[in-house]
Structures are given as structure tokens and as C-alpha cells.
Image (cartoon, helix red, strand yellow):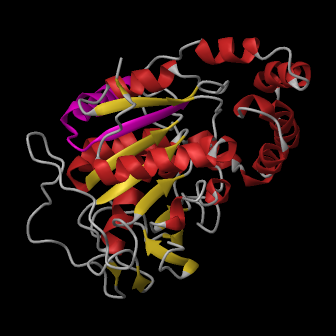
Amino acid sequence: MSYDGVELSYRVLEGRVGGAGERGGVAAAGGPGGRAAAGGSVGGPDERVGPGGPEEPDEPDERGRPGEPEEPDEPDGRGRPGGPLVCLAGGPGRDAAYLGDLGGLDTHRTLIIPDSRGTGASPPSPEPWGYAFPALAEDLESLRAHLGLESFALLAHDAACATAQAYAAQYGHRLTRLVLVTPGSRLQGELPDDAEEIFESRAAEDWWTDAYVAVHTLPTTADMAEVRSLLLRAAPMGYGRWDAPQRAHAATEPDQLGPVPRAGFWQGVDDPARHALLSRLPEVGCPVLVITGDRDALTGMRAGELVASSFRTAAIRTLHGVGHYPWVDEPDLFRPVVESFLQRGHDPEARGGA
């Protein structure tokens, strides 16, 4: 599938242990086999970017397919315990800068953080359907080819979990690990009400009344400036507590949202397409970890259970005292959970899907 050669940007955070800090790159979108548009090296010695494009393996990578033994996450030779972790931002349509370094996940591992179409440094899509999450999954495959990765670990947050599921359904054999952080369950066709229950349970907190008014005003507000103001007023419900780090993180949201990518995220995804995608998720063989927060009043915890139940290999880990952004609320809790799962392929404290 062609995307007219649109060049999409990505950011590389190289591990602080033996790494070289942050840098950026550009990948040409265009589906499988997309042409590389920027040089550089990422991850281990076999994970590189070349100006002439990726070197594809002779045979498909078999790691993570059903019935196959899971390979350990091996050191990459430069002090980091494993290959790069590709990280997808949600919103939908939010600048990936809000992910930061995901609570220090770049300490021992290279993070590759792409800007989806129309966000960050990536140009807008030439077609409206280019913002839809199935198209974004094809962009992710172009990025993989650009980086020359036979397989990789993938982390997605919020709405990007739909993009990650679309990618897993189509290219599951490319994934070694899949981490879905505070996902919604619109793709599963259900919208549980436990997020509202979590919100109501926090009514004694100082910010709650103003957030309540903002939440109930948003559905009837069309002006984008007003929408941004209301989102900021409602922001405390997305965090486990409302302290300085949370306030600083929330303050960036209004200017990071792209209304066009946000509106186009579910473009053209009808029920037959949704069911077809879901039908392929049980075939995904790589380990899957779904992370939820027990104070997440945006998506709640039940949505994560529904997402996990779509996979044969998924487990759920609920973090206590954590909202929709676990790396902001409790980075020293979130980071070890993710890193341990990436290395071991399982979480001993997680439970099975619903």
C-alpha cells in the first residue's frame, strides 16, 4: 500500500548506560519495504539503518509464533539488555513528546518513538484515511523495515494500543514482546463504566468539582480552544494524584493535540473490519502484558481486561496508586515492571485476561 512517500519522523533515546543520548530520524512511509530516508544506527549490531534501505531476512522470523519456544531478550553488546523498544503515543493524535523517556526506560534500552502522521515533526497525511489506526499500523511496519529489524518489542499507550493490536494482527510474527499501557476497549466493542466509578470515588479531592463540570461540558463543545481549556481542567482525573509532576505533564497536553489526526483515528473502521482484526489476535504468539492503573478515571481497569482477553498469551498487571500515565505517577514502579517483562517474557505478579 502506498502512502505517497510521506516521510515520518521518529526520535531515538539511546540508553544512558553505554548510550549516546537523544537523536532523531526520518522514515519514508509506504507499507512493507518502505525506503529508508535517513541513516544512523539503532540498537544492536544487527539493528541498523542504512541509506539504501533495510536488509530483509531471507525467511520470516519465527519468534513468538504459536507453539514456538520464546527466545530470551539478549544483551545488545553495548551495555543494554536487549534490542530497541518501539513506543507508540496515544491521544489519539497527541505529540509523542508526552511520553518523555517513559519513566527512565531508556536507562538500559534504546527507545524509538515515532511521531504519527500530523503530530510532532511528521507531516499531515495526504488522505483522511491515513490517520486511521490500521494505516498507522502500516506506517509502523515501514518504520521496522527502515530500521532493518527482523523483530522487535513494542509498547503502546492509550489509543495507540489499537494501532499496536492492528499491527499484531497483521505482523505478529515480527513482535517479540507487546506491552499495552492503560488501553481503552473501543476496538473490542465495549466501553466499561468502571472509569466513571473511579472518577466518582475521588469526589473528595480538591480538583474534582471543576473536573466534573469540564467532563460534562466537553461533549457539546466544538471550539478547539475551548476543548483544550476543558481538557486541562479535567486533567487531574488522568493521574493517580495531582502533584507538581502531574501538573507539569498535564500542562503540555493542550498544545500537543492535533484535531485532524484525532478525528481521523477511527476513520473507516466498521464492524466487519473490527471483527476481522480481533479474529487474528488469538494467533499472536509473543508474550503480551497489559498494564492498568487502579486510579485511572479515563479508561479504567476493565477495558484492559477486555483487551487482554483478545489474546491467547496476554496477562494483566494493575499498578496501585496509578492513573492513566503510570510513568508520571510512579516511575519507579512502572519502569521495573516493563523492563522485567521485556527481559523475561512474563510477569510473575500479573494475572490472566478476562
Residue 11 in the image: above or below residue 153? below
Q: Is residue 91 left or right of residue 46?
A: right
Residue 250 in the image: above or below residue 353? below
- 313 or 113: nearer the viewer: 313
In the image, what residue occupies the spot 30% across and 44% down?
168
Q: Is residue 188 among what the camera can see?
A: no
In the image, what residue occupies the spot 52% across and 59% down?
105
- 331 or 198: nearer the viewer: 331
| Residue 121 horizontal/vertical position (percent) | 63, 69
For the image shown, how many numbered marks are present on the structure?
0
Magenta region includes residue 273: yes
Q: Is residue 95 left or right of residue 241?
A: left
Stretch of the chain drawn in magenta: 271-292
Q: Is residue 33 left or right of residue 113?
A: left
Residue 304 in the image: above or below residue 147? above
Quadrant position of the N terminus in the picture: bottom left
- 335 or 25: nearer the viewer: 335
Q: Is residue 267 among what the camera can see?
A: yes
Magenta region includes residue 275: yes
| Residue 118 horizontal/vertical position (percent) | 61, 58
| Residue 55 horizontal/vertical position (percent) | 22, 79
Quadrant position of the C terminus in the picture: top left
| Residue 12 horizontal/vertical position (percent) | 52, 72
Residue 352 in the image: above or below residue 328? above
In the image, what residue occupies the spot 23% across and 34% down?
280
